[in-house]
């Protein structure tokens, strides 16, 4: 094992002085790596590149020691300076210390030279450790003070986009030096928050904002941004309607306070994410809980070339880079997703998304946002990139280690390709799994062990539209519910999707006949789109079910429509019979506008992968607005998929989207058909 050598910078015009100094120190048991600097003009660059632990200034006739101390104070104020003189006495030592040196040494007294170097190295290391501890203490103190603080609710009143009143609590937080009254409310929030705020204000004035919390970035007087959860309510000011923006005070709850204090102990102070020792148990605990729907993936993320950035800004300041990146990462995550600092500059995240496309979209957007974001650290502006390795993980704690290893392998491939990208783990062997699933699927079809679930589609224009997305569940032989993400891929590979589709369509027609909904959205697979016998089968089943065709909307994904020319003919025939037709996962394809020109459509569903990253991404907002406008021109209504929070809903409102669906609206609910209903075949 190579012994660590202490990096030193020596200002001298003599190579022999450096060689002698190295020999003296190594003979005394202090291994060093000396870098010689002859001219002070090159010292700043060397200090930034080498990051030495000690600076030795040789007191040679043409050297002025005062400028070297001044330069040191600008670049590395913590770096100790020792003066090296040929002859020493008390007067010479005192003179050297007056110019900024910690002490003076001489090659003529090797024992004292080595002792002073050891002392200064130890002192400098202790001082840096103390500074790091103090910074950590301050970082821990601030959240604790925030927990203990109990101000009143901060409130402003807004009329026609202008702040007409602000209470003292709001001014204490955001405007102590000037009144906010009379200012446009948008000027009080950062640019990414404004679309959501506009939508929420509009909805609230129309009486369609039901106490949801809006996450927004309020501009602090110091120039920073304070992320806050704001409640909007209708109010009155001087006899006129207004909207109240309320930042609720943190009420002191002793039990909650203890929980929050305990939570702080589990989190890394620099990033606010879980420590590695707490992250792994948290991941295992989450995987032990059945997935509410969709897929679970692990993401292993590491900042690229962090060592270079650390050399540039310094080790202590480089923690700010991690803090900024972790903040950016947290903003992309859903409430139940687990994230932590996995070690060094690596982060590990358990993602819970609708489908693998959502995971890929999240990863690509994280990489792109990281590369675009510049972080100011002192006098430096640093732009970082990151690499993401992705791997699917089953809802089973025993699969965690294998999934982490797969994500690490994917990350390694990404760094080998140059970094600044996302790479997914290779697909696992499927044959043994398919054999098992094929048996279960055929058995479930034979024994009628499939079930429907519905998820409401809500209108952003108000009123109950009685529209539902139809979802599928399978009940296994032990009575346990199985989500489609677990078996549909095997069904597709083994030509079983057409059979499953017919079961779903039959059950949906029975449901439509019984419940008479406004609309049921029923998915069709690519296999069914290509199945020439489906239309004939549907014609016969429609007569027996006695359902109103207008209450059923068949939908296919954008990808299926792109890849299958039969889609247009099928859509035309279904609409001829009175059914409606929709395109889901819409907006990601390059030819999205061509599709809505060429297909007969009633609805388009904006891809959930776009929706989930919409709230603070202005490029995506512009894209979705354009999609909505183009659809409206053609009389096609728009629905946003997988809406998870009020902030996203408010942005969609502002962009002109008409309907939303997702867990923010309601979780899926199982359908129980009345006895005697026709059994789908």
Image (cartoon, grey):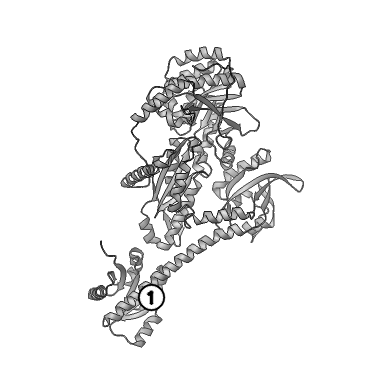
Helix, strand or loop at disc 1? helix
The spot of residue 264 in percent (x, y) is 52, 56
Q: Which residue is mark 1?
A: 67
Q: Is residue 455 above or below residue 68?
A: above
The spot of residue 457 in percent (x, y) is 58, 31
Which residue is situated farthest in the front direction here?
478
Q: Residue at x 44, y 14 (%)?
A: 533
The spot of residue 312 in percent (x, y) is 38, 61
Q: Residue at x 36, y 76 (%)?
A: 119
Which residue is situated farthest in the right direction here?
239
Q: Residue at x 65, y 57 (%)?
A: 151
**Badge 1: few (under 14), some or many (20 or more) residues near its Cα, within 10 Å?**
few
The spot of residue 33 in percent (x, y) is 28, 68
**Observer-nearest of 556 and 677:** 677
The answer to whether residue 149 is seen in the rendering is yes
Q: Is residue 154 above or below residue 634?
A: below
Q: How many marks?
A: 1
Where is the N terminus found, in terms of image quarters? Answer: bottom left
On the picture, is 59 further left or further right than 300? left
**Observer-nearest of 30 and 578:** 30
The answer to whether residue 567 is seen in the rendering is no
Q: Is residue 415 above or below residue 63?
A: above
């Amino acid at each position: 094992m190579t012994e660590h050598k202490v990096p030193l910078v020596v200002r001298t015009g003599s190579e022999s002085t450096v060689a002698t100094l190295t020999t003296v120190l190594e003979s005394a048991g202090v291994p060093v790596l000396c870098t010689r600097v002859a001219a002070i003009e090159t010292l700043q660059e060397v200090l930034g590149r080498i990051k030495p632990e000690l600076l030795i200034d040789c007191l040679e006739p043409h050297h002025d020691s005062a400028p070297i101390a001044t330069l040191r104070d600008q670049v590395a104020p913590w770096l100790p300076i020792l003066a090296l003189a040929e002859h020493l006495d008390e007067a010479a030592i005192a003179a050297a210390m007056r110019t900024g040196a910690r002490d003076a040494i001489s090659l003529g007294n090797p024992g004292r030279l080595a002792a002073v170097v050891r002392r200064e190295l130890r002192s400098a290391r202790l001082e840096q450790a103390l500074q790091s501890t103090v910074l950590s203490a301050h970082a821990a103190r601030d959240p604790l003070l925030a927990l203990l603080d109990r101000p009143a609710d901060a409130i402003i009143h807004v009329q026609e986009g202008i702040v007409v009143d602000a209470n003292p609590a709001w001014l204490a937080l955001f405007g102590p030096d000037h009144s906010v009254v009379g200012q446009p409310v948008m000027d009080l929030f950062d640019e990414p928050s404004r679309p959501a705020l506009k939508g929420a204000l509009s909805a609230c004035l129309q009486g369609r904002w039901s106490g949801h919390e809006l996450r927004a970035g309020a501009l602090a007087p110091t120039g920073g941004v304070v992320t806050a959860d704001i409640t909007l309510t209708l109010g009155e000011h001087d006899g006129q309607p207004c909207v109240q923006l309320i930042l609720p005070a943190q009420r002191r709850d002793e039990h909650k306070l203890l929980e929050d204090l305990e939570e702080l102990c589990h989190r890394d102070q620099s990033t606010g994410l879980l420590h590695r020792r707490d992250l792994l148990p948290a991941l295992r605990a989450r995987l032990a809980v059945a997935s509410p729907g969709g897929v679970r993936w692990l993401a292993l993320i590491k900042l690229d070339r962090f060592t270079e950035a650390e050399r540039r800004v310094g080790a202590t300041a480089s923690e700010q880079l991690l803090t900024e990146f972790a903040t950016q990462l947290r903003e992309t995550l859903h409430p139940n997703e687990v994230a932590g600092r996995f070690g060094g500059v690596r982060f590990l995240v358990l993602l819970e998304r609708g489908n693998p496309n959502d995971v890929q979209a999240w990863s690509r957007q994280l990489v792109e946002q990281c590369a675009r974001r510049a972080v100011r650290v002192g006098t430096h502006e640093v732009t970082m990139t990151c690499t993401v390795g992705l791997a699917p993980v089953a809802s089973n704690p025993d699969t965690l280690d294998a999934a982490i290893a797969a994500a690490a392998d994917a990350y390694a491939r990404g760094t080998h390709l140059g970094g600044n990208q996302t790479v997914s783990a290779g697909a696992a062997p499927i044959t043994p799994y398919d054999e098992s699933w094929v048996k279960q699927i055929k058995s479930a079809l034979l024994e009628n062990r499939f079930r429907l679930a519905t998820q409401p589609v809500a209108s952003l224009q108000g009123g109950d539209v009685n529209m539902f997305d139809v979802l599928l569940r399978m009940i296994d032989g032990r009575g346990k519910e199985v989500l489609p993400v677990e078996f549909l891929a095997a069904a597709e590979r083994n030509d079983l999707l057409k059979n499953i589709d017919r079961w779903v369509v039959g059950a949906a027609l029975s449901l439509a006949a019984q419940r008479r909904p406004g609309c049921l959205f029923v998915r069709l697979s690519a296999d069914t789109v290509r199945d020439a016998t489906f239309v004939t089968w549907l014609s016969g089943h429609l007569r027996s079910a006695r359902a109103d065709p207008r209450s059923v909307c068949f939908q296919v994904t954008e990808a299926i429509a792109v890849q299958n020319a039969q889609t247009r003919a099928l859509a035309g025939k279904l609409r001829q019979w009175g059914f409606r037709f929709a395109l889901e996962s819409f907006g990601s394809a390059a030819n999205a506008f061509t599709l809505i020109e060429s297909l007969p459509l009633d609805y388009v569903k904006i891809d959930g992968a776009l929706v989930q990253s919409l709230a603070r991404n202005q490029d995506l907002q512009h894209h979705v607005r354009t999609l909505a406008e183009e659809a409206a021109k053609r009389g096609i209504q728009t629905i946003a998929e997988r809406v998870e929070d009020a902030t996203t809903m408010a942005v969609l409102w502002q962009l002109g989207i008409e309907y939303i669906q997702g867990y923010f609206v309601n979780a899926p609910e199982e359908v129980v058909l009345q006895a005697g209903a026709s059994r789908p075949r």
